[in-house]
Amino acid sequence: MKILVAVKRVVDYNVKVRAKADGTGVETANVKMSMNPFDEIAVEEAVRMQEAGKAQEIVAISLGVAACQDTIRTALAMGADRGILVETDAELQPLAVAKLLKAVVEKENPDLVILGKQAIDDDANQTGQMLAALLGWPQGTFASKVELGDGTVNVTREIDGGLETVALKLPALVTTDLRLNEPRFVKLPNIMKAKKKPLEVLKPADLGVDVAPRLVTLKVQEPPKRQAGIKVGSVAELVDKLRNEAHVI
Amino acid sequence: MSILVIAEHDNAALKAATLNTVTAAAQLGEDIAILVAGHNCGAVAEAAAQVAGVRKVLVADAPHYAHQLAENTAPLVVGLAGGYTHILAPATAAGKNLLPRVAALLDVAQITDVIQIDGADTFVRPIYAGNVLATVQSKDAVKAMTVRGTAFPAAAASGGSASIEAVAPAADAGVSSFVGQQLTQSDRPELTAARIIVSGGRGMGNGDNFKLLEDVADKLGAAVGASRAAVDAGFVPNDYQVGQTGKVVAPELYVAVGISGAIQHLAGMKDSKVIVAINKDEEAPIFQVADYGLVADLFAAVPELSKELDTLKAAG
């Protein structure tokens, strides 16, 4: 069994991003970048399957600027076997990413593709579902449990009312939710080892994919700031304010 | 402009999020159809036909739509898409599972979590946990978008008189099947539809202590929510989670108890009308967005709040 995991380089989750003054985007100069947290969960899940003897090879793929190699190296340090970077400076929207991933999947023929359910930069929550659609594969989105069977995978999904379990025929695609696992910390020797693992670099044109954006971003701005209110001294005062000032209880 | 709204339902009842999506559709045009894909879902179709502003209800009733698996529902929507300029779904777990699959099959972009409609092709959506709003323009022939319920009021559930039309089901894709579900049982209002929400965080200490919040919630007719930290710690089920990657809520009153207020949590609740924070750490970021902050030990303050509410009730 071969697993492909997709990892995205995003602004670190601890950074509070700001819109650029001219409204063309967000400030990313000198900002800490990390692997998208949901993608760390995806890598962890693949590595655990390999450790359990259920997977033979894990390929980590990222798409974007040359610095995405760092993100792939992190995945390799976590336990992935080799990496692929589809390198481009162009803006990549989810549909373009799904098309590029489809081209790579068709070359690599994995049995399972695992991605994060959403990236914490564009918050789109689309790429996995789009890739599954383009491949004609079943999708187990927002997974909190993944159980491999014989030619099938059972995925327990976080849905609005609780949990739902679906059975998917392999090859299949899974997107991760927060409760799937807790990603490991990468140890230094593994970071050193990861540097020696193979990393192939491709271009979108090599894959024959048109990555032109379908959405034009006209403007990026910060929403109006919510002002801090007052501190109350007691529970009684709080109830009084809610009753007689805010009129909400 | 002709708009197709994907209904969210459980084969028995139309989910409230559909009504907010209809309001967004009405801002785009008057020619609104609702698709109800399910099994033995006649009652849902009847309910959808009553929704104000809806002209037509399309019903696809087949066993393989019973659990609305995206593998089966997406081709159905794609088959119907030809007649529409816009396809809208609620930005819920179900809508977000389905609509990207539809968009990819149509070879169009999908726009997630639309909070404002600036024109037929221009929409505003939050990015970076809502710290920034992006205005995007779609160049595609069909605009596929999920609509954030808190940004649009609910359409009236009655007053409409749409026609109901059966549509032929597409084939069963045969690649996925429903195994089972574990739904949280609760008599309290749904989190995304509640007028008041009482939420707990890591400060609650354990799942048992959430009973303190449930007690207050029941006196207020409120729903109970949680921060990611409380869900990850196993205090409460995943469907309680409010935040960037959980549920987005905007009730009249949001009471945050023992929640520090990470940006990921604020992303899910900062549009609430009135925010109350109870936390013993006066430096907690939650106080920066709270209208009323109480620096106190929650284990003293919450039972006291419960008693005060009794007094209030007794006084009428």
Image (tube, coloured by chain):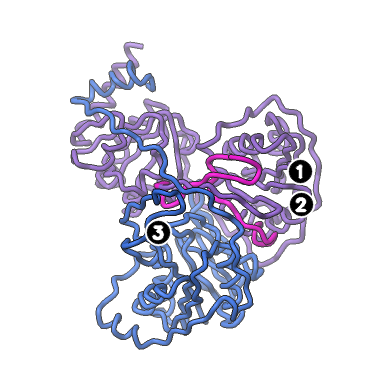
Chain colours: A blue, B purple
- Numbered circles on residues, count: 3
Please, which residue is most extreme toward the top here? B315
In this rendering, which labeled residue sits more in front, label 1 or label 2? 2
- Magenta range is B103-131
In this rendering, which labeled residue sits more in front, label 3 or label 2? 2
Q: Are marks 1 and 2 on the same chain?
A: yes
Q: Neighbour class for label 3 at 10 Å: few (<14), some, many (≥20)?
A: some
Q: Tag 3, which chain? A: A
Residue A54 in view of the camera: no
B117 falls in the magenta region: yes
Marks 3 and 2 sit apart, C-alpha to C-alpha, by 36 Å
Residue corresponding to mark 2? B80
Asked if disc 1 and disc 2 are in contact, CB closer than 8 Å, the reply is yes
Q: Amino acid at mark 1?
A: Leu
Q: Tag 2, which chain? A: B
Q: Estimate the x, y position of residue B160 in percent, counting from the top left.
A: 72, 28
Under circle 3, the secondary element is loop
Q: Amino acid at mark 2?
A: Leu
- In the rendered view, would you say A164 is above or below A185? above
Which residue: 32% across, 13% down?
A: B314
Residue corresponding to mark 3? A179
Residue corresponding to mark 1? B58
